[in-house]
Image (spheres, helix red, strand yellow):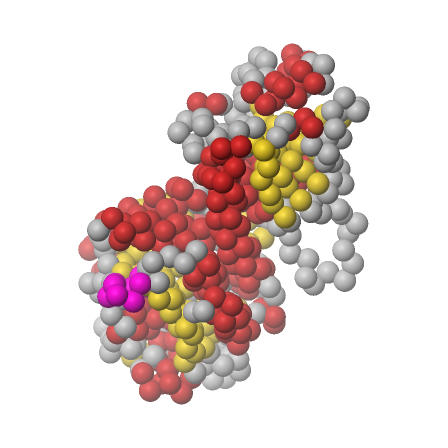
Amino acid sequence: MEIKVIAGDITKQPVDAIIVNLFEGTERPTGATAAVDQALEGAISRLIAQREAKGKKGEVTIVHTMGKIEPLRVALAGMGKQAELTLDTIRGAMGEACRALRKTGAKRVATIVHGAGMGGIEPEEAAIAITEGSILGLYTFKRHKSKIENETEIEELTLVEREASKIRSLERGVARGKVLTDATALTRDLVNEPANYMTPTDMTNIAKKVAEENNIEIEVLEREHMSELGMNALLGVAKGSTQPPKFIILRYWGNRENPKKLGLVGKGITFDSGGISLKPAEGMGEMKGDMAGGASVIATLGAVAKLRLKINVVGLVPATENLPSGSAQKPGDVVVALNKKTIEVENTDAEGRLILADALAYGRKLGLSAMVDVATLTGAIRIALGTHCTGAFTNNQDLVDKVVRSGEKAGEKIWQMPLFEEYKEQIKSEVADIKNTGGRFAGSITGALFLAEFSEDTPWVHLDIAGTSTSTSEKGYTVKGATGVPTRTLINLALALTEEGAKQ
């Protein structure tokens, strides 16, 4: 979808539909909505009076203009209470409105700049949110459908602003919004792919393409090199599959004079059967998405390069399948990780932490100044936080605060979880230094404590996205399937660290 910005009057746009807004509790329209209402001879006011349009979040009311203005339709997007307006409200309203208009067959749509100037929201920020909400709300994954339903796609969205002085800032917002949405859409695409189309080799090829298009250095470690390095925790997981494991290393150099390097580490289990500790058949197909963390890291590196940020970022993605076979790793096996720690594999379905152990240890070997790992690590985090919030674990409060703020800016909720020493008792092993499961209780915490053994004293944040990487429902700019979480959070983190470096 092409997005452009113009100066003009929203009522005079030759488009199939325009999007204006309505706040909950409003008795009569204001601003641009009032201008549209006046041109429609009070049609919107009558809908408000009759309580057909209430302005609640998620509500979209379609009004036919009957030739009274040039646009054929008006989509009245509910924004909730004006005092509670946020960038995420704007994103959600645009997602709902664009999907509603797609159903009408609209191809060309125009919108006012929702929220600009309200509650401290700058025009550029509003334009970013409008871009994110519209593109992500319209996202579909239909690559493997032999017959596509006869549904018209919106081809053009125009942001219409009365004040010409704001056009440049709006254009900057649209440009940045497109980088954010392109990266998120890439993450969604990778996670939505069936596992037979997204093997470790396929994932590597995507990473190579991203690197080539964005002048990013890429190195891929094969099984032999991993063995030489001592990545036996990763290789143990890979033993059950005929697909060769890959260790993807992406390097973006935005400021070679700065020795600091941010490390982003993503779990890349392209299919997780549980291994010998086999998962139940019901729902196992969802395990094609167990590489969501790795997908978000690859997409983030591409976005950081497109934005030309003055920061150094290294992406590490250990990629393999976890399958049962005659050669597969067994419960009770002991493996030696890259940092020489021995691990008792109590459950082969706790494989993500094994491959991340070697990845985090490798990150320390590279001298990364900080590391953020992203993983669909535990079902326990879904029990603790449900599907609306990512769990964060850390050994560095300053770093996790930056991550949480970056998530808030993206509309991706993150909640910090504890890492108390007492929980370590659960992952003590009788036969090795550590075991890979800590029992039923506090599963997300013991999983994070396991990873902490390999991040050691490097500032580190672990994001458990098992509850937030996919969605079973459609709401706002979230669609069914992969969400793309936490790609925009990671990009915002890189932006924040770049700004912090510039100030210093």
Where 228 sits versus 482, above or below? below
Position of residue 27 measured from the top left corner of the image (x, y, whole percent): 57, 12
Position of residue 221 measured from the top left corner of the image (x, y, whole percent): 41, 80
Find out whether residue 481 is within the magenta segment. no
Front residue of this view, candidates 209 and 355: 209
The residue at the point 51 percent across, 56 percent down is 183
Tell how many labels.
Answer: 0
The residue at the point 67 percent across, 15 percent down is 38
The residue at the point 45 percent across, 26 percent down is 118
Front residue of this view, candidates 146 and 431: 146
Find out whether residue 259 is within the magenta segment. yes
Q: Quadrant of residue 6?
A: top right
- The answer, for residue 442, to whether it is visible in the render is no
Where 211 sits versus 150, above or below? below
Residues in magenta, as a range: 255-263
Position of residue 129 measured from the top left corner of the image (x, y, whole percent): 50, 40
The residue at the point 54 percent across, 39 percent down is 130
